[in-house]
Image (spheres, rainbow, N blue to C red):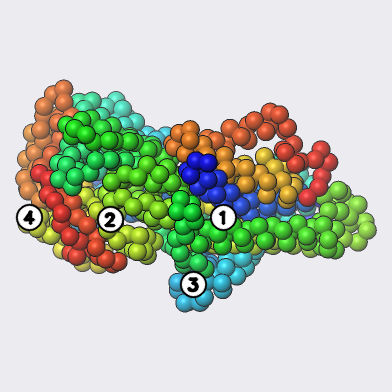
Amino acid sequence: MDQLFVQSLVLGLLQGGLCALLAVGLSLVFGILRVVNFAHGEFAMLGSFAAVFAVTTLGLPVWVGLVAAAAGGALIAVATNLVVLRPIYLSRMRHKGEYTIIATFMLSQFLIAAATLLFGTTYRKLPGLWNADLNFFDYVHVSGNRLVAFGAAILLIGVLFWVVHRTDLGRAWRALTQSPLGASVVGIDVHRYANYAFLVAGAFAGLAAALLAPLIFVFPSSGVVALVKAFIVVIIGGMDSIGGALVAGLLLGVIEVMGTIYVASGYTDAYGFALMIAVLLLRPAGLFGKVGRAI
Amino acid sequence: MTEISRPLSRRTLLTALAGATAVTLLPAPGFAADDILLGLVTPLSEPGDARSGEAIRKTADLWVKMTNDAGGIIGRKVKLAVYDDQGKVEVGVSGMERAITEAHASAVLGAWSSSVVLAQMEVAKNYNVPMMIFYSWADDITKKNYPQIFRIGPYNSQIATQMVPFVKERGYKKVVVLAEDTAYGLGFAKAFEKAAKTLPGLSLKIVQFQAQTQDLTPQMSKVAASEPDAVIVQTVFAATNLSIKQGREVGLKADIITGWDWPLLPDFWPTVGKAGVGVIYPTFSDPSMKVTSVGQKFINAYKAAYKTDPAIFQYYLWDNFNAVKAAIEETKSSDPAQLVKVLPNIKFEGTIGPVYFRNDAGTVNFHQWDRFAMFFKRLNKVGDGEAQAQLLYVAK
């Protein structure tokens, strides 16, 4: 088999795992609350800054940095739900969905500007857990940090899948996706479980960004590209499917890397968009999306 | 969600949105009628090259302060009207329009990205306002021969021509140009492809990528698989560092030649680490470069103000401002049309030597200063800066 093909496939899968991790939080929140969250990328960005602060400023170990990233992302996500979104979806307004889109988009712009003011435009890097360039069979080259990131992404998505399908928290979330009113009638605290959804979404976003940070860089607008990838993944996988997000993430990673290497190197993002358009045309609910509501 | 407990009125929501919008907008600038207004349209936020924009802003602020402290120009105070172009063509054009029509700028400076400049030039031409360029390299900027456009700084085809002897001297047979998909990146790639035709036996491949990318691993895998002797990277700071780090990650063994002053920025080594060892960078600056008294005054003032050395592109920007100053002094007027008339023949002491424009109509050397040398240097160990870098070659 062509050696470059193997390298491309490995890179694509590794990259796709991280796209999926970024996207599952978006998918979770949409599935439960029907909120299209344009500030999701900034949860990731702020999480990665929290990790950089913990590791490079406070001198804490890298794993503590990852915890800080998850905590930072979760904190900002819950605050977003409480301060920005809850007043909208509790209001009597029509078109709440549109208002949440506008509000989260403006919040995204605000957070980028605030991060630029606070942290400046300097690019930062986070040390990884496995800082080694690895070579398999003499032609597959990957960094240890990329393998760690992929492994962590798959593990976390697996844990989330288990939580959704095997725990009371997951049952409550699934009830909310079916009918928020019905869920509240049977005693599920809607606001509490909405907060949990945002907490998990923010934590996953922050963690994904911190796992990516040793591979790329941390800067105030780094969440913008992450958000675009996450949206493509949830649209391809189905707006409310965690399993779909994983498959779509892997597919997106492979398509983008293969397209860049074998078709043309200057259109990396276009391959993902082309795939998304094809899915929308052939299967508008996404590859794993359902007509009803589910997560 | 169907529970209704705390209704939010539309008025409250709209007030909150309006408030948030208001705090993100800059206050409209106010200027005295007697002030000389200069427009500064530059990238101050992402996705533009905000790091360079910050350096541009600092240089401009310093020049204005020093000029006003010395009594202004023809007895009038100078003020800046600053607009953020965000590295976007449409925002840059809007900023240019506003600098000219709102602030009535006598000249516009600070432009950075070639792609943005090529669109802004049309605005400068329509309003007949001088536009000063310093580090936007697309040949077309001066090749279009617009009377309003002046460049004190390098350009792609000359840089490419100067790079060819270096490639020959190093004995490279297989070269890849990794270029961002902008007028700056692809402009250089095409210029180098043309200039390299003088090197028989050289295999050249161009690999382009999206300028805003955050992961170059696929492109670098493709480059590494072609096993080149050298990779010339033509992009700005973030992608430069990514290409080095990720190129080594995927097994790239070739020499990496990457411009231009990015390896001297303070975040180069923290982000690249040991992958930066062996990187060759061409630059227009070297400790051996002769600096004039004007240049020394600038360097001293910059160090005093910002506790760091200015980069070479800031020297060129300083000369841009001084060119406008010289034109105003010569015409005793801040009328843009008058400045457009006299600027082609302006001569003054620049930061690294006398500055004057070549006015070869029909060529890229129209309203173009081209007296610069190019130095090729290698970083031999982690933490190397300009003083420690090994000088490999000088192209003049």
Alpha carbon separation for disc pair 3 and 2:
27 Å
**Which amino acid type corresponds to the residue marked 4 in the rendered image?**
Lys
**Residue A226 makes an appearance in the image:** no
Mark number displayed over residue B205: none
Q: Nearer the viewer, residue B298 or A133?
A: A133
**Which amino acid type corresponds to the residue marked 3 in the rendered image?**
Val
Tell us which disc is closer to us: 3 or 2: 2
Label whose residue precedes the other's in the sequence (4 or 2) = 2
Q: Name the residue tied to disc 1.
A: A42
- Asked if marks 2 and 1 touch (Cβ < 8 Å), the reply is no
Q: Nearer the viewer, residue B127 or B87?
A: B87
Image: B283 above or below B385: above
Q: Residues within 10 Å of mark 2 (few under 14, many from 20)?
A: many
Helix, strand or loop at label 4? It is loop
Q: Residue at x 18, y 39 (%)?
A: B164
Looking at the picture, how far across and down is residue B132, in whole percent? Answer: 22, 39
**Which amino acid type corresponds to the residue marked 1 in the rendered image?**
Glu
Q: Residues within 10 Å of mark 1 (few under 14, many from 20)?
A: many
Alpha carbon separation for disc pair 1 and 4:
47 Å
Q: Residue at x 73, y 55 (%)?
A: A86
Looking at the picture, how far across and down is residue B352, in whole percent? Answer: 10, 51
Q: Name the residue tied to disc 3.
A: A55
Q: Residues within 10 Å of mark 4 (few under 14, many from 20)?
A: few
Q: Mark 1, chain letter?
A: A
Q: Are marks 2 and 1 on the same chain?
A: no
Image: B19 above or below B106: below
Q: Mark 3, chain letter?
A: A
Alpha carbon separation for disc pair 4 and 2:
25 Å
Helix, strand or loop at label 3? It is helix
Q: Name the residue tied to disc 2.
A: B279
